[in-house]
Amino acid sequence: MIGVFSYLIFFATTASILAIAVLGLNLQWGNTGLFNGGVVAFFGAGAYGTLILGGTAQAGHLGGFGLFYPLALLGGMAAAGLMAWVVGLLTLRLRHDYLAIATFGVAVAFENLMRNAEWLAGGAKGVRGFERPLRAALGDGFIYNLFFFVVVLLILIATYMFLERLVASPFGRLLRAIREDEEAARSLGKNPARIRLMAFVTGSVILGLAGGLYGTFYAFVSPQDVLPTLTFQIWAMLIVGGAGNNRGAIFGAFLIWGAWTLSGWALSRFAPVDVQLYTGSVQFILIGSVIVGMLMWRPQGFLPERLVVSQRGKPQQTQQGE
Amino acid sequence: MADPILQVRGVTAGYVPDLPILRDVSLAVPPAQITLIIGPNGAGKSTLIKAIAGLLPVSAGQITFQGSDITGLRTDQLTAHGITYVPQTDNIFRSLTIRQNLDLALRRAGSDAPARLARLFDQFPALAAKQREKAGALSGGQRQFLAIAMALATAPQLILMDEPSAGLSPKAAQEVLEHARMLAGQGVSILLVEQNVNQALRLADHCYILAEGRNQIDGPAADLRDNKVVGEIYLGNRRVGAT
């Protein structure tokens, strides 16, 4: 029984970390309309940044800063934000599909850099020498995982609350206005380029936070963790959950991660042996089918964007349904 | 005549470099008047207003506002100078409520925002009554009124209006144009591009006619209303300054 519970904690921790990443993407795409096709690069920058800043000295790659863990995590977030700022300055003039292609290219370049620049982050062998915070006190077992899950859950709730406030604020309305019609926003004296950049950087910092927590959970990160697959999964979570809705983003993360995990288990248990060799590919087909199905029959996702009207102190919520 | 608030001198502009739509176009907008730009399809009317609004690059010529050179300034920078552009379509944010649309436009108003909002609701009571409704649910005419109200929220001295009556019923179009007349009466200068020539000529003070990206003729709107040359320019039977 403890085994099942332990696995559920493990599952919920990973799903919660991914949910934080989906919230970051939701700010960029759901609220601002920025098609970030390089999600994994910012997630990876957070993971690599946290582990390099918080790890012990290692021969052969950058590291050994041994920062106090919260500072290392903040450093990872800052790395993601800095990268987003540079990438944003260069690419945010592009629209939709072109922005997606450019940012996808950034993610591929990031993975290749991490794979080949051994001096930077250990190359294909990944970043070594990171010890999870409070490991000495809590050990490596179930207690630690439970503790870490609680920490991740609290961070997920804090991120959700921050974004809910942001979306309901005048700045959030401005993001939606720019998503809807940049020219009209400009005619009212708004500078869409600056605001798009702010949203892109903020979303990427949240992606970096998720990456930092992911790297912490596994105490390791390598180029295998920053493959385009993860971008694909995080996008699937947002589309299925409901772009523009933070609750939808979290729901989508748990749903898709659950479906991914369950399909892997089911294939390994029930599929013929020769099919099991292709479990990963079959999972991709299944998830891809779910995305296509959602886009055809429920493009707004399970939890569609809500319009939050706040006047005279009394919030009222209605469905958007354009 | 008072000094023009906006002066366009010899402007050449277009969407693609080296392929100008406008060639050497000039006009002047006097304060607190409606200056109308008309012309056949493809004359460059919307291109001209977009070039003035900072949405298209100006490759030659100069645009001045109250004596200051504003050539090449971005649309959002022009708003700070007192010029607001109202696009022809997609000029409101449909997923936001009417109130949120106005709040967005009032963001720079600071402490003056509540008073300005109250004035706008006095001026547009239909918007006040529906302030909590989504802007996307408004009729075409009401959307134009919301767009005008949003422009007014920025406290402009000059409003650039690109075909505000496009797609409206004759009655709604008349109401929108009459509202423009009222704004001019309140001291706001208006540069208006219109396809609805007869109605617009009745309301405007001065009119410029463009064809093939060039100035053709201009004069007091009342004089041009019965001018046969206007019809000839529209039918393509007459051109001034074409190469």
Image: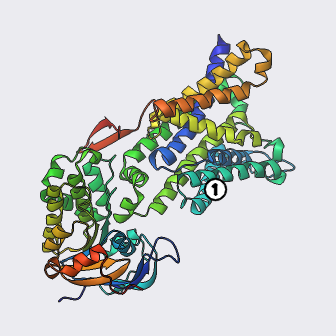
Is residue B119 visible in the rendered structure shown here?
A: no
- Residue drawn at x 13%, y 60% as measured from the top left: B123
Relative depth, front residue between A214 and B160: B160
Residue A17, image x, y percentages: 60, 35
Residue B216 location, quadrant: bottom left
Residue B152 location, quadrant: bottom left
Q: Say which element carries label 1.
A: helix
A34 up-or-down from B110: above or below: above
- Residue drawn at x 86%, y 50% as measured from the top left: A60
Q: Quadrant of the N terminus of chain B?
A: bottom left
Q: Residue furthest front?
A: B237
- Residue drawn at x 31%, y 36% as measured from the top left: A317
- Residue drawn at x 45%, y 46% as measured from the top left: A31
Residue B212, image x, y percentages: 37, 77
Total number of numbered discs in the rendering: 1
Residue A140, image x, y percentages: 73, 27
Relative depth, front residue between A298 and A17: A298
Relative depth, front residue between A67 and B234: B234
For label 1, the crowd category at 10 Å Cα-Cα, with few meaning under 14, some 14 to 19 and many 20 or more, is some
Q: Amino acid at mark 1?
A: Met
Q: Residue furthest right?
A: A59
Q: Quadrant of the C terminus of chain B?
A: bottom left
Relative depth, front residue between A81 and A142: A81
- Residue under mark 1: which chain is it in? A
| Residue occupied by mark 1 | A83
Residue A125 location, quadrant: top right
A193 up-or-down from B63: above or below: above
Residue B114, image x, y percentages: 21, 58
Is residue B76 visible in the rendered structure shown here?
A: yes
